[in-house]
Image (spheres, grey):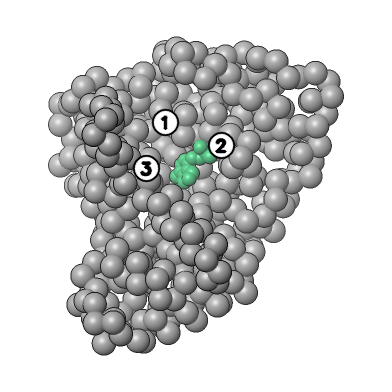
């Protein structure tokens, strides 16, 4: 993919499977921003994909108690019985979907769930349909596993959502998976039941295509948007759908590294084979903490949602006031994906022409001390992603700087 910093060293030969894969551009921008900060520049980083609040106290306490009880050994390979039970109850309670314990898997983050699933199912040349803009790891993991990412552009005026005819046209005999993410990183767009239904109809007509849904941002939705997961809408899909979720974003537990999924038994077993040869079980202490996250009080989710909503509204309205920038109101997650097409062709005070979204985000970082990520990193240009998981004061200052930087373009 074009969005990477590749490993280039004549003395080192990498395996072919990582020839097109590299370190994420998001991390590269983060590193550059951190370097500028070290030089004493007041950089505001709106790049990180993690909540700014802390892991809830009851979850931390559960982890400490697990350590004190001696739960510091290997657990069952793909999840302790306690955590699988908590996950099954979560799917039942929140999504209305029944998964038996042997239809549930737990991994070191949802990222490993994706990795296990693709490793376990993809043969060279198999295709995975990925609507763009997409979370960069999707296509990279598919490539590492020898598959072919089939990227389908979903424009802002379509709400960044895949349309039925686009799905129909992308399906070939080699299609193995369709991968959907709602609410989306990076666009914040989410699929309602009526958005999903036409896609589900197509999938029902193509039984060789399996569905992977990434519901990671399920709990971060705004206004009266009603989150739904496809298997709840069409039980026929359950036999070929992997429903992915995790504790990272909802419970501010990115560092604990626990993700989980529900899916057909044979797939779950195949994924365990990969996990057994890669990492064995996820951290026992983190699993105990995740049981508490899923079973414990959930009221704080609503409070945090309200706080994120205030920040979303602040950022979206500030961006839409800037000449040359357009931003749709996202239904969920903590990202905005704004169009900067109106700025392409303008010239910076130093006489440099803005030719792309990367030129624009470089300009913001170098002259306005604001780090955001260009749309090219997510497969759709000209856009840029802002993560608004930071304080309102910082967001206000960042918006002021972005507006001033844009006003300086001629
Ligand atoms: N899915 C999406 C859409 C994400 O944004 C992320 C984190 N950036 C993940 C999955 C992975 O989450 P984790 O591995 O922390 O569970």
Q: Nearer the viewer, mark 3 or mark 1?
A: 3
The residue where tag 2 is placed is 246
Q: Secondary structure at mark 3?
A: strand
Dot 2 beta carbon under 8 Å from ligand 1: yes
Q: Is residue 244 visible?
A: no
Residue 150 x %, y %:
21, 39
Q: Which quadrant holds the C terminus?
A: bottom left
Left or right of 296 in this view: 47: left
Q: Are marks 1 and 2 in contact (CB under 8 Å)?
A: no
Left or right of 69 in this view: 392: left
At horizontal 59% and vertical 71% (from top left) the residue drawn is: 394
Task: Give whichever of discs 1 and 2 has the lower sequence position.
Answer: 1
Q: Secondary structure at mark 2?
A: strand
Task: Compute the Cα span from label 1 to label 2.
Answer: 12 Å
Task: Give whichever of discs 2 and 3 has the lower sequence position.
Answer: 3
The residue where tag 1 is placed is 114
Mark 1: give few (<14), some (14-19) or many (20+) Cα within 10 Å.
many
At horizontal 26% and vertical 61% (from top left) the residue drawn is: 381
Q: Is residue 354 visible?
A: yes
Foreground pick, 328 / 147? 147
Residue 371 x %, y %:
45, 65
**Which quarter of the figure has residue 188?**
bottom left
Residue 387 to residue 252: above or below? below
Q: Which label sits on residue 209?
A: none
Residue 368 x %, y %:
44, 76
Dot 1 beta carbon under 8 Å from ligand 1: yes
Q: Which quadrant holds the N terminus?
A: top left
Q: Nearer the viewer, mark 2 or mark 3?
A: 3
The residue where tag 3 is placed is 23
Task: Compute the Cα span from label 2 to label 3.
Answer: 23 Å
């Amino acid at each position: 993919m074009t969005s990477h910093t590749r490993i280039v060293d004549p003395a080192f030969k990498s395996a072919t499977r990582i020839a097109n894969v590299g370190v994420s551009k998001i991390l590269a921008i983060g590193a550059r921003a951190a370097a500028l900060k070290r030089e004493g520049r007041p950089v505001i980083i709106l790049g990180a994909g993690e909540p700014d609040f802390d892991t809830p106290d009851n979850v931390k306490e559960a982890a400490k108690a697990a350590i004190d009880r001696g739960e510091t050994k290997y657990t069952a390979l793909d999840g302790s019985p306690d955590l699988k039970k908590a996950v099954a109850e979560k799917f039942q309670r929140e999504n209305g979907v029944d998964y038996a314990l042997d239809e549930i898997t737990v991994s070191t983050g949802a990222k490993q769930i994706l990795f296990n699933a693709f490793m376990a199912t993809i043969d060279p040349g198999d295709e995975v349909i990925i609507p763009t803009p997409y979370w960069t790891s999707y296509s990279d993991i598919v490539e590492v596993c020898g598959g072919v990412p089939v990227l389908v552009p979903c424009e802002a005026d379509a709400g960044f959502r895949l349309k039925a005819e686009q799905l129909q046209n992308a399906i070939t005999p080699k299609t193995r998976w369709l991968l959907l993410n709602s609410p989306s990183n990076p666009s914040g767009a989410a699929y309602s039941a009526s958005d999903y239904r036409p896609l589900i109809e197509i999938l029902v007509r193509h039984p060789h295509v399996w569905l992977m849904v990434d519901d990671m941002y399920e709990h971060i939705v705004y206004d009266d948007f009603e989150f739904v997961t496809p298997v709840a809408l069409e039980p026929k899909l359950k036999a070929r759908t992997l429903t992915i979720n995790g504790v990272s974003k909802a419970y501010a537990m990115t560092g604990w590294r626990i993700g989980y999924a529900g899916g057909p038994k044979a797939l779950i077993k195949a994924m365990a084979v990969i996990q057994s040869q890669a990492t064995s079980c996820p951290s026992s202490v983190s699993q105990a903490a995740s049981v508490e996250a899923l079973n414990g009080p959930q009221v704080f989710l609503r409070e945090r949602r309200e706080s994120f909503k205030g920040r979303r509204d602040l950022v979206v309205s500030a961006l839409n006031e800037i000449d040359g920038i357009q931003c749709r109101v996202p239904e969920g997650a903590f990202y905005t994906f704004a169009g900067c097409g109106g700025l392409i062709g303008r010239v910076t005070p130093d006489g440099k022409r803005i030719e792309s979204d990367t030129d624009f985000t470089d300009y913001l970082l170098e002259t306005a001390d604001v780090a955001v990520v260009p749309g090219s990193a997510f497969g759709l240009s000209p856009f840029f992603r802002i993560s608004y998981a930071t304080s309102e004061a910082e967001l206000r200052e960042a918006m002021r700087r972005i507006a001033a930087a844009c006003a300086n373009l001629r």
